[in-house]
Amino acid sequence: MGLWIRSILEAKRDGGLLAGPDIIRFIDGVVSGSVSRPQAAAFLSAVFIHGMTAEETVALTLAMRDSGVVLSWPGLTGPFVDKHSTGGVGDKVSLVLAPLWAELGRKVPMISGRGLGHTGGTLDKLEAIPGFSTDLPTARLQEILAEVGCFICGQTDDLAPADRILYALRNETCTVPSIPLITASILSKKLAEGIDELVMDVKWGTGAFMKQRADAEALGASLKAVGEGAGVATRVVLSDMNQPLGEAVGNALEVTEAIRCLQGDGPSDLSALVCALIGDSRAAEVLSSGAAYERFAHMVTAQGGDLRAPLRGAGCETEPLCAARAGVITRCDALEVGQAAFALGSGRARAEQDIHPGVGVTVHHKTGAVVQAGEPLVTITHAGHGLEAARALLAGAVVVGDG
Ligand code: URA
């Protein structure tokens, strides 16, 4: 074993601090293979147990960012901005935020992910639009950014490759829930987009990665400190994910709702979160004017999509679930609604699984709403698969009580 890696592992094992050059050498070794997988696993366990200072986490983030391609936008005028969400149920914010922020004069080079488990992914949603491509060469992305002001695409293999290796090892070694490791993982990929400003939507609640608000606050504080330490102006918005965001949960259903929102007619919680994340006093007025829809349509066309064609997965059946009694909604649980949509086929348990773009759940009322007996609480959009499971989950997810 090389002496240098031994001394890094011993230092972190004993709760010591690592210097920037040691962290860079470690990450280079992870990617080149000169640091073995057991050594990398030992490093992750030591960080999980002892944590890292903000300075160490900045060094880890930058080393992971620099393990691959760092995009730049020559010839274009910024500011270049992006948003990252820690994931939730019904979270179609990116589809609205990217064109709206571009409409407000920013350049938004957005690299997004796919859904896993009960949380949805922006790329899966956009791929419900026939022809929409999330896999475009960098030269084309540069053209779209110049022409439209925003794009939304998938991550390429050469972006932060150290994160892919370390994330797989974190899964195997049960070291995923570590704030410095999560911070470095998220920010290394975002900082590789070549952005000047980042806003983080850190969600908490039953449908979120972080169940407790205090954990989301801790992650938010770490993301802000490390983002700024790495030279990117970083804001954090904490958002409630105890209930689904908006009404639609499921890929094509969410695209339709995002379009409504872009046309100035979205659910109030969705519009409010988009505007809070953008943090520009003009955002609400521009959103309600519908002006950002044209920019969305332009982005879709530039990425090969056809908004005149029916969304993929069209032709599903619908089934309402109605209130058995009059009263007030006392519970509308994001996790169970997400699990119901997942049971219908809207999400995947493993990265290689197929999804059904058309299925999902529409939530008609949220906590506090007054309903009459027989009124639809949710509508299930299905293709015959998983209906029993979805019905059972939704019966417990949405509860009518006495208020
Ligand atoms: N998302 C990421 O990209 N990385 C993590 O570690 C957790 C969530």
Image: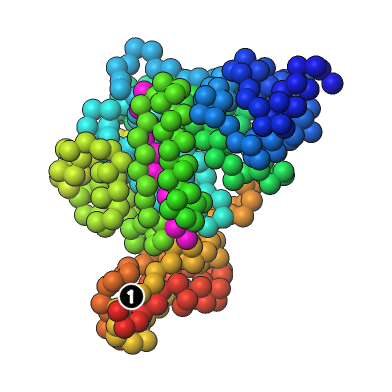
Quadrant of the rendered image containing residue 371 = bottom left
Task: State the residue at coordinates (36%, 50%).
Answer: 239
What SS does tag 1 mark? strand
The structure residue drawn at horizontal position 49% and vertical position 56%, both measured from the top left corner, is 211
Q: Position of residue 101 (x, y in %)?
A: 27, 35
State the residue in front, 180 or 347.
180
Q: Position of residue 142 (x, y in %)?
A: 40, 21
Q: Is residue 43 visible?
A: no
Type of the residue with mark 1:
Ile
Q: Which residue is mark 1?
A: 329
Based on the displayed image, in which of its 4 quarters is residue 198 positioned?
top left
Left or right relative to 61: residue 302? left
Q: Which quadrant of the rendered structure holds the N terminus? A: top right
Q: Is residue 327 magenta?
A: no
Q: Which residues are magenta?
A: 195-206
Q: Residues within 10 Å of mark 1 (few under 14, many from 20)?
A: many
> Which residue lies most toward the right here?
1
Q: Name the residue at the top extreme.
A: 75
Residue 290 screen position, x and y as percent:
19, 45
In which quadrant of the rendered view does residue 251 lie?
A: bottom left
Quarter containing the C terminus? bottom left
Give the residue displayed 21% in from the left and 36% down from the top: 280
Looking at the picture, does residue 364 appear above or below residue 191? below
Which sits in the foreground, 55 or 325?
55
Q: How is the image coloured?
A: rainbow
Residues 265 and 328: in front is 328
Above or below residue 383? Residue 164 is above
